[in-house]
């Protein structure tokens, strides 16, 4: 009897597959799509379907970064998630073209509440956002609008070294955990290619506990950011130039998830 019980316990604890975290959003850009995200993004004038260009040879999307007086033209879109949660992970694949100019940095995607705050707009108890940035020479950083009344723009921490290479597919996970009201116990963790590269801890992301402040919005957000032409992408002769990046396999999962690395050769 003891041996039989031990065998059952062994099957339950060792042989069982781990439970997957609930998926709140998934989009691979292969037809037919069901999420509605692809249709929404492809309406933007700087987003195009890239057939067979994904890391596994499937379809992806291609974003064009067009220089203008404040960096590059904004490519932004907001999309509601399937549920409202306190912890979630945004995951996506990205490949910056070989001629991409990181310049002085720019925005990448993130998560937010019912009404996220970005663009230097005023913070409020029900408004926050958590995104990441690409930085000069392939660095990255967390980029967060929290409840700090003294900060006009986002705060965050930069990676020690370069984490993005041109012409290479990378897997990005942005893990977001909300604080409880009145406490600075939230955090944002950036994982690239399975490695933790930057984090922002002890965050007061939201000013109140409510349905409106839960994680419930995906922020597709990518552009060279800033307030003057020096942030625009440029060529080797320092002339403003259009550059491109590919995105694929966007998902948002409830809980904190670390994706496997993209296999070499894909």
Image (cartoon, helix red, strand yellow):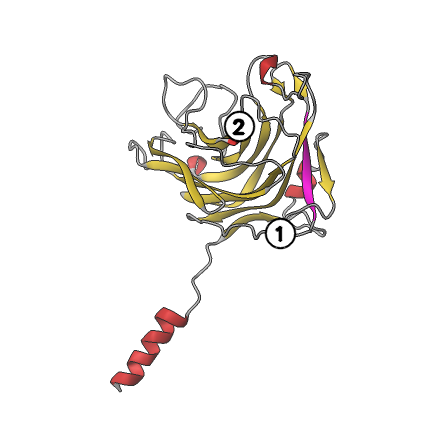
At label 2, counting other C-alpha atoms closer than 10 Å, the crowd grade (few under 14, some 14-19, many 20 or more) is some
Give the dominant element type of the magenta stretch: helix, strand or loop.
strand
Give yes or no for contact between labels 1 and 2 (Cβ–Cβ under 8 Å): no
Question: Which residue in the structure is indicated by mark 1?
Answer: 265
Q: Is residue 63 magenta?
A: yes
Rendered location of residue 72, percent (x, y): 63, 22
Which residues fall within the magenta stretch?
59-65
User: Going 36% across and 32% down the picture, which residue do you hit?
Assistant: 208
**Cα–Cα span, label 1 and label 2:** 24 Å
Observer-nearest of 74 and 33: 74
Residue drawn at the location 68% of the way across and 40% of the way down: 61
Please, which residue is most extreme toward the front here? 236
Q: How crowded is mark 1: few (under 14 residues within 10 Å), some or many (20 or more)?
A: few
Horizontal arrangement in the rendering, residue 190 relative to residue 226 (left or right): left
In this view of the protein, can residue 189 be seen by the observer?
no
Q: Residue at x 65, y 22 (%)?
A: 73
Q: What element carries label 1?
A: loop
**Dot 2: what SS?**
helix
> Residue 98, position in %: x, y?
65, 34
Foreground residue, 236 or 44? 236
Q: Is residue 62 magenta?
A: yes
Vertical comparison of 73 with 57: above or below: above
Per the image, the residue denoted by label 2 is 137
The image quadrant of residue 12 is bottom left
């Amino acid at each position: 009897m003891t041996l039989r019980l031990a065998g059952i316990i062994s099957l339950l604890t060792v042989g069982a597959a781990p439970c997957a975290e609930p998926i709140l959003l998934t989009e691979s850009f292969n037809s037919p799509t069901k999420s509605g995200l692809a249709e929404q993004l492809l309406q933007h004038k700087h987003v195009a379907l890239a057939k067979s260009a994904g890391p596994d040879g499937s379809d992806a999307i291609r974003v064009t970064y067009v220089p203008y007086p404040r960096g590059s033209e904004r490519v932004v879109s907001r999309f509601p998630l399937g549920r409202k949660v306190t912890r979630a992970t945004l995951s996506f694949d990205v490949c910056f073209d070989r001629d991409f100019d990181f310049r002085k940095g720019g925005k990448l995607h993130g998560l937010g509440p019912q009404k996220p705050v970005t663009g230097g707009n005023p913070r409020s108890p029900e408004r926050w956002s958590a995104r990441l940035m690409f930085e000069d020479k392939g660095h990255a950083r967390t980029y967060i609008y929290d409840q700090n009344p003294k900060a006009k723009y986002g705060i965050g921490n930069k990676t020690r070294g370069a984490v993005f290479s041109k012409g290479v597919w990378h897997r990005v996970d942005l893990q977001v955990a909300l604080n409880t009201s009145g406490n600075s116990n939230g955090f944002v963790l950036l994982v690239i290619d399975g490695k933790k590269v930057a984090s922002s801890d002890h965050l007061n992301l939201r000013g109140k506990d409510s349905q409106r402040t839960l994680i419930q919005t995906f922020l597709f957000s990518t552009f060279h950011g800033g307030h003057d032409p020096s942030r625009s992408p440029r060529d080797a002769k320092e002339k403003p130039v259009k550059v491109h990046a590919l995105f694929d396999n966007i998902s948002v999962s409830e809980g904190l998830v670390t994706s496997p690395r993209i296999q070499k050769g894909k």
